[in-house]
Image: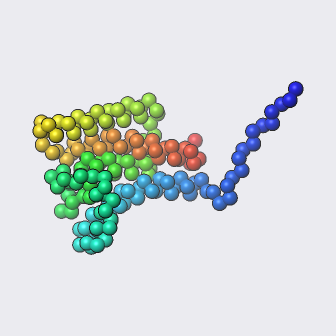
């Protein structure tokens, strides 16, 4: 009778540091929130050329209608309030890898976030209520935070930082 040899663990790739890779991956998500803050800071202090460079990516991801954009200390955000909720929620929760929801809870949370976001979006666009920044921001957060936490948790788990 021939017995199979035990499966050998693959050799580590020279120079591969799983902890550093996990840190870099999660930090890249955190960089989104830093980018939003840097964009606003450059605009606030009047560094027009730097602001235009930092602001360019946001033109591609958001309509930025003036009535739908929040201002912080008199400086408009580079995203509308809903997109700000989505991008900031996703970036911060992925960077800290929280919340780490079980798969069933994640499905419920994401489905609930989608329903709330679509409900808020449709009722606003039908004119049933005016643009209301708290619900727009919250609708983005409710969808993005569970997704960001799941992404950050997968990064941490797959790169060995968490059992």
Q: Position of residue 1 (x, y in %)?
A: 88, 26
The structure residue drawn at horizontal position 40% and vertical position 47%, both measured from the top left corner, is 93
Residue found at x 41% / y 34%: 106
Give residue 8's quadrant in the image.
Answer: top right
Residue at 28% x, 67% y: name it.
52
Residue in the picture at 39% in, 51% down: 91
85 displayed left or right of 162 = left
Vertical placement of residue 112 versus 130, above or below:
above
Image coordinates of residue 2 in percent, x first then y, are 86, 29
Instruction: Report whether residue 146 is seen.
Output: yes
Q: Position of residue 161 (x, y in %)?
A: 56, 48
Rendered position, 134 above or below 14: above
Q: Image quadrant for the C terminus?
A: top right
Q: Vertical placement of 117 versus 1: above or below?
A: below
Q: Is residue 162 visible?
A: no
Q: Along the horizontal axis of the image, is 156 left or right of 36?
A: right
**Residue 53 on image: x %, y %:** 32, 67
- Residue nearest the viewer, comparing 50 with 72: 50
Question: Is residue 4 toward the left or the right of residue 90 in the image?
Answer: right
């Amino acid at each position: 009778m021939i017995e199979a040899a035990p499966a050998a663990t693959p050799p580590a790739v020279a120079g591969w540091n799983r902890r550093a890779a996990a840190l870099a991956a999660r930090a890249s998500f955190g960089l989104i929130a830093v980018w939003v803050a840097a964009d606003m800071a450059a605009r606030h202090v009047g560094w027009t050329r730097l602001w235009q460079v930092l602001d360019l990516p946001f033109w591609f991801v958001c309509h930025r209608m003036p009535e739908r954009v929040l201002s912080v200390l008199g400086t408009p955000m580079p995203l509308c309030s809903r997109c700000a909720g989505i991008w900031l929620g996703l970036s911060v929760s992925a960077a800290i890898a929280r919340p780490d929801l079980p798969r069933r809870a994640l499905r419920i949370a994401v489905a609930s976030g989608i329903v709330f976001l679509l409900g808020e979006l449709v009722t606003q666009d039908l004119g049933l209520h005016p643009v209301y920044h708290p619900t727009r921001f919250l609708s983005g957060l409710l969808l993005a935070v569970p997704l960001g936490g799941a992404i950050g948790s997968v990064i941490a788990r797959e790169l060995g930082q968490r059992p």
